[in-house]
Image: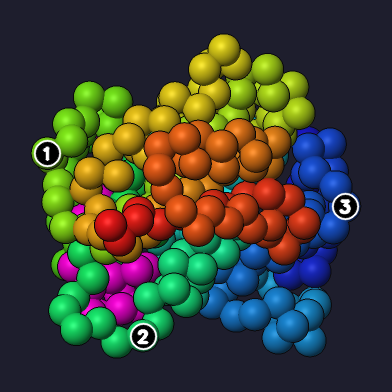
Amino acid sequence: MTPIPIYIKAFRDWLTSQLLPLYAPQEATAIAQWLLEDLTGQAWGRLAMHPQKALSSTTHQLAKKLARRLITGEPIQYVLGKAPFYGRDFMVNEHVLIPRPETEELVHWVLKELSSPPPFPHQILDIGTGSGCIPITLQLELGKAANVQALDVSSSALEVAKVNAEQLGAPVIFHQRDILSAQHDDFEGLSVVVSNPPYVRKSERQYMHDNVLAHEPATALFVADEDPTIFYEKIADCAFHWLRPGGMLFFEINEAMGERIKDLLQQRGYLEIIVRQDLKGKDRMVKARRPIK
């Protein structure tokens, strides 16, 4: 094997070349630079000013170790043990999905809808919380204006979410619960229910990147082709009872399911149903409101 370079730019170029079988050139370069930024604590723009500067012996050894994991296809977020979301770093591992930009857009939409100071704290529930990025962000952004709870079926995912809540100082209450077994009287008086449930149909696996399929938890990603809206139906049914009159339900959705989700919400009595596109122009989010009367 070719010796792994010790100089910053040479190491970046070497790692980029090793990642090219897995990623497009621009993404491979971004991953290599991200690794070096994290290990040195400096932005790439600053590192690039001194391309012939050598990595310290300790940093070089760690960089080589982490690079080998990246070359196998392991996502950099798992390699580093963290992922950025809404301006904060969240711990992630193989038990939780890596937070994605469209989920940030969903959170931003929820916050925008809750921007007016409430007469009493908003009561918010996140379903299928994973790393906890949604409820923790909502709690931190809203502060005393909200009381946030979250649930997940996975005890391993909840361990990650609780660590993130503690490290970021968010007093979110977590519950281990299977939403498919939820009852209409489990919660009441909620202002908002938000969820990013599993929504990728198993037939869509062929279009997904190998590093996602090999490393991210399948139970948090996939649903059966014959019943792709199972989680949306159950959550919509329960949320109609859990929400206070006028309360809002937010979903992240499969881009091919916008009209189908809209229809099932209409059938269950929700009003003001909006399907919103993400920054890439794909149907990715839905908001609906429980009637006031």
Residue named by callout 2: 116
Q: Position of residue 276 (x, y in %)?
A: 64, 58
Cβ atoms at labels 1 and 2 below 8 Å apart: no
Whether residue 80 can be seen here: no
Number of marks in the rendered image: 3
Amino acid identity at mark 3 = Pro
State the extent of the magenta-drawn residues as a range: 137-154
Indicate how the structure is coloured in the image. rainbow
Depth check, mark 1 against mark 3: the one in front is 1
Q: Within 10 Å of the Cα at label 3, are there few (<14), some (14-19), or many (20+) other Cα atoms?
A: some
Amino acid identity at mark 2 = Ser
Above or below 190: residue 233 = above
Above or below 263: residue 286 = below
Amino acid identity at mark 1 = Asp
**Which dot marks residue 185?**
1
Residue visible at 42% across and 48% down?
A: 270
Q: Which tag, 3 or 2, sits closer to the chain's start? A: 3
| Separation of marks 3 and 2 at Cα, in angstroms | 44 Å
Q: Which image quadrant is residue 12 in?
A: bottom right
Q: Which tag, 1 or 3, sits closer to the chain's start? A: 3
Disc 3 on helix, strand or loop?
helix
Q: Specify the quadrant that holds the C terminus.
A: bottom left
